[in-house]
Amino acid sequence: MQNQSDQIEWRDGDVPVSTRFDDPYFSLENGVAETEHVFLAGNDLPARFVDGFHIAELGFGTGLNLLVAWDAWDKAGCRGTLNFTSFEAFPMEQDDIERAHAAFPAFNGKRDLLTKAWQTYGGVLNLPDINAELIIGDAAQTLPDWQGKADAWFLDGFSPAKNPELWGDDLLKDVGRHTHANGTVATYTAAGFVRRHLTQAGFDVSRIPGYGRKRHMTRAKLIT
């Protein structure tokens, strides 16, 4: 069986870089601030949070997006459960997850809970107040069979120029099919073909200011 785990090298101290795609897992400037700007603000979160709200993600990476969303849910004082489903083809090994997490804030203990719950083979992660599931495999194959629908999508694959498979027309149409009415998408990239594919998938697409050195990013809302 082929090893699905990603191949990591470490740059500038503890910044993990995928050698498979030659791309860092999070912003070299401030990964937490980037996630808050792109994925939370880009999806109008936490203002939209309600019990049972469902976030789905293409590209789990280090799990930073999950941590930031989970912490925002907690700080917003939401009652009930946040659902979070992530699709990941190349999960990090336990040692690499632990090393990457050392660079993150503690998030009131959530970081260490996620590190402890991490399992390379995926499945439901044992975490409080959040129903988190990691689906391992090529999203082009796993997403069509998914039975869920998301209220908000975090599209966080590696750069479209380096990982075009995760930004293809058919896959983004599957994102549209697995989005609730008036659901949203946010991503750090403003690549023209990504915006066109989202439009073809039924979304109203906007280009807005990006984070840090990235001038623009994309947000979209499903047209009903």
Image (cartoon, grey):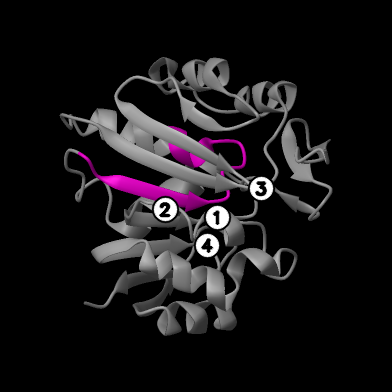
- Decide whether residue 69 is among the magenta residues: no
- Decide whether residue 54 is among the magenta residues: yes
| Residue 108 image offset from top left, x and y in percent | 39, 17
CA separation, marks 1 and 2?
9 Å
User: Label 2: how many residues lie within 10 Å, few (<14), some (14-19) or many (20+)?
Assistant: many
Instruction: Tell me the quarter of the picture where residue 70 sits.
Output: top left
Check the image and report above or below for 142 versus 60: below
Reading the image, the residue beneath label 3 is 89
**Earlier-in-chain disc, 3 versus 1:** 3
Does the rendering let one see residue 161?
A: yes
The amino acid at mark 4 is: Tyr
Q: Nearer the viewer, mark 3 or mark 1?
A: 3
Rendered-image quadrant of the N terminus: top right
**Decide: marks 1, 2 in contact (CB < 8 A)?**
yes
Instruction: Tell me the quarter of the picture where residue 74 sits.
Output: top left
**Earlier-in-chain disc, 2 versus 4:** 2
* Secondary element at tag 4: loop
CA separation, marks 3 and 1?
12 Å
Q: In the rendered structure, which segment of residues is drawn in magenta?
A: 52-67
Reading the image, the residue beneath label 2 is 39
- Tell me, for residue 188, which label it has, or none: 4
> Residue drawn at (36%, 48%), measured in percent from left and top?
55
